[in-house]
Image: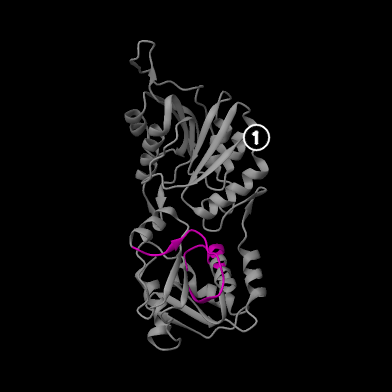
Amino acid sequence: MTSGALEALSYPFERNFLKPPGKGERVLVIGAERNFRPPVAAAADMTLVQGFRPDFLALRKAGFDVVPAAAGSGFDAAMVLLGRHRAENEARIAEALVRVRPGGAIVAAGMKKEGAASLRKRLSGLLAMEGHAARGHGVVFWLVQPERGNGEAAAALSRSSACRADGFETAPGGFSHNGVDPGSQFLLASLPDDLSGAVADFGAGWGYLAAGIAGTLGRVSAIDLYEAHYPSLEAARRNLARGAAGVPCEFFWHDLLSEPVTRRYDIVVMNPPFHRGRAAEPAIGSAMIRSAARALKTGGRLFMVANRPLPYEPVLASAFAAHGEIVRNARFKVLWARRQEQSPSGGAVSRRARPIRAARQSS
């Protein structure tokens, strides 16, 4: 969230186009990120909705009342912070439309370069807008909920924002929301056949890897899914309810970079992100590798996929007793690592890195 969007959000209240929510009134704020500050006119009781775990934790630490998903109705107003994803923005507007009482105001703001102006134009065909304005690089638009509400418009936006991929439900704004990620496909196809015991999927998204492991590897006893994006985790919960082939699954809304994993696993699989927003940050993947090392049992194994240029091998070497590469193609490489085993005398055994099977080149 940029300061431009926050500035634009304040505009209709500062210019008296809308009456500021008063004390005792309830305001739903959808999409607030860690740097959120209330508009100067907002003195009401605010409930913030933020489904990305790191931002949720930062907002809660700052003293806000914050929840991972909107609930309830009868709010006196809603403020919607828009992002880059069209489907996610439409889903946020739909949430506001079903939560705000008749006569309540709905204000949405975002950045021009991220499509906020285009969204306003699309919504003007569905909703009776009260006004809109440009504020620097930001755009704001607002409406007042009619007496009969906007149920039809909310339903239309919910339908248009629904995301699916190859028979799976995905989540607007989440990783690979518009299709199965080719890196995850490559990892699943490259996993060895001898996986067994308790498995953790770090950065599980909407559950593609977990569903594939549950459906094809019969000796897996349980799968735990860890994901920071709450809507993706909820989609994974529904996907695995249909496709886990009887394997017990548990779901953890979790920030692997700041929150410790308390359980221990025989196997960890992951396709770690290496972007935060628009900036490339390979350090995210490095931190997840270290988290995986801590979460594995003695002798436990990690399997991960990464873009070929990313230098994760030194991190694997520092965190594990052995590591290697299974296979690579033109874009990705699948890596493995094993935590230290204990010798019969109780000492650690370190094994020379070797691939599980010979690496091959493929296009």
What is the x, y in percent for residue 324? 42, 26
Q: Which residues are magenta?
A: 63-90
Q: Is residue 317 visible?
A: yes
Judging by the rendered image, the residue that carries numbered circle 1 is 215
> Which residue ends up furthest to the bottom in the rendered image?
16
Q: Amino acid at mark 1?
A: Gly
The answer to which of 165 and 13 lies nearer the viewer is: 13
> Which residue ends up furthest to the front in the rendered image?
24
Q: Quadrant of the N terminus?
A: bottom left
What is the x, y in percent for residue 264? 45, 32
- Colour basis: one colour
Instruction: Please rate how many residues cluster around mark 1, counting C-alpha atoms within 10 Å: few if below 14, some from 14 to 19, many from 20.
Output: some
Number of marks in the image? 1
From this view, report whether residue 172 is shown above or below residue 140.
above
From this view, report whether residue 161 is shown above or below residue 358.
below
From this view, report whether residue 74 is shown above or below residue 308.
below
Q: Was residue 169 drawn as part of the magenta stretch in this picture?
A: no
What is the x, y in percent for residue 14? 37, 85
Q: Find numbered disc 1 in the image and state the secondary structure of the residue it sits on.
A: helix
What is the x, y in percent for residue 164? 63, 53
From this view, report whether residue 193 is shown above or below residue 243.
above
Q: Quadrant of the C terminus?
A: top right
The structure residue drawn at horizontal position 45% and vertical position 55%, both measured from the top left corner, is: 52
Q: Is residue 81 visible?
A: no
The answer to which of 99 and 277 lies nearer the viewer is: 99
